[in-house]
């Protein structure tokens, strides 16, 4: 029986919502599959297969970051599942490549603009500030590759002597927040998004749902 033949039933409330979502994906209705999964995972948040199917829906729709969050949620329930591990690794690598390509392209555009513009027009358009932002993100990316999870001793030291708040002049972007999220540093990602909300109150609504997702992940026990 296909989902379309179950008229009148709220498939998202059924414990078999993951199967229904899979059928929607197979017949080319990823948005409907996503709606079923969102409703189902809200009803059954502990269901690892449901979180896995939610990640596949996001992946099909090209929403890689949200897919990674769903796969990590699935791993909380089934930490040794090789399928979920492989899907998460693939999504992380795709997102990393996409960011690197974006950063390189922005650097090339800025360099070309700087070389073709007069010094006066370059400075008047704020070129130096834009270039500094890109260089900062590239340094963050290079540093992110070297980040390793802290051991128990380091975690205990951090709890006893928490790091000081970053200076208010620090450059914060949504891309930087996602670098932290991709590395599993949810507290840093949350801090970055909250800073963005303070710096750009007119755009705060864009980050509210992302903040809620990250706060939920930060509350989950580490596997």
Image (cartoon, helix red, strand yellow):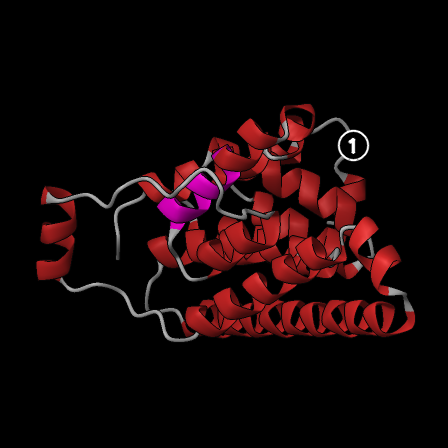
Depth order, front residue of 21/128? 128
Query: Which residue is most to the front?
Result: 120
Depth order, front residue of 139/96? 139
Q: Position of residue 108 (x, y in %)?
A: 78, 75
Q: Position of residue 59 (x, y in %)?
A: 67, 60
Does the rendering let one see residue 94? Answer: yes
Instruction: Examine the rendered structure and indicate whether residue 21 appears above or below residue 206.
Output: below
The verdict on residue 187 being magenta is yes
User: What residue is at 68 percent from the left and 29 percent from the top?
Assistant: 203
Q: Residues within 10 Å of mark 1 (few under 14, many from 20)?
A: few
- Relative placement, left or right, of 172 versus 81 is right
| Helix, strand or loop under label 1 | loop
Depth order, front residue of 176/114? 114
**Mark 1 = which residue?**
7
Instruction: Examine the rendered structure and indicate whether residue 33 appears above or below residue 131.
Output: above
Q: Magenta segment range?
A: 186-194
Q: In which quadrant of the rendered view does residue 112 lie?
A: bottom right
- Relative placement, left or right, of 32 versus 120 is left
- Relative placement, left or right, of 148 versus 34 is left
The verdict on residue 106 being magenta is no
User: What residue is at 85 percent from the left and 57 percent from the top?
Assistant: 120
- Relative placement, left or right, of 37 versus 187 is right
User: What residue is at 47 percent from the left and 54 percent from the top?
Assistant: 181
User: What residue is at 64 percent from the left and 75 percent from the top?
Assistant: 97
Q: Position of residue 5 (x, y in %)?
A: 79, 41
Q: Position of residue 201 (x, y in %)?
A: 63, 24
Does the rendering let one see residue 45? Answer: no
Q: In which quadrant of the rendered view does residue 105 lie?
A: bottom right
């Amino acid at each position: 029986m296909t989902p379309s033949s179950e008229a009148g039933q709220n498939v998202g409330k059924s414990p078999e919502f993951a199967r229904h979502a899979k059928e929607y994906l197979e017949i080319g209705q990823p948005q409907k599959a996503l709606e079923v999964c969102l409703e189902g995972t809200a009803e059954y948040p502990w269901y690892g297969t449901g979180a896995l199917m939610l990640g596949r829906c996001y992946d099909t729709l090209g929403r890689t970051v949200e897919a990674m969050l769903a796969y990590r949620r699935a791993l909380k329930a089934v930490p040794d599942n090789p399928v979920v591990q492989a899907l998460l690794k693939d999504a992380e690598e795709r997102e990393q490549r996409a960011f690197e390509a974006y950063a390189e392209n922005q650097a090339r555009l800025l360099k070309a603009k700087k070389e073709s513009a007069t010094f006066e027009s370059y400075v008047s358009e704020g070129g130096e500030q834009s270039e500094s932002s890109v260089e900062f993100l590239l340094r963050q990316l290079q540093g992110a590759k070297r980040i390793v999870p802290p051991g128990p001793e380091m975690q205990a030291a951090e709890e006893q002597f928490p790091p000081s708040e970053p200076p208010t002049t620090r450059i914060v972007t949504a891309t930087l927040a996602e670098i932290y999220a991709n590395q599993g540093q949810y507290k840093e990602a949350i801090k970055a998004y909250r800073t963005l909300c303070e710096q750009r109150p007119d755009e705060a609504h864009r980050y509210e749902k992302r903040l809620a997702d990250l706060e939920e992940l930060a509350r989950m026990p580490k596997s």
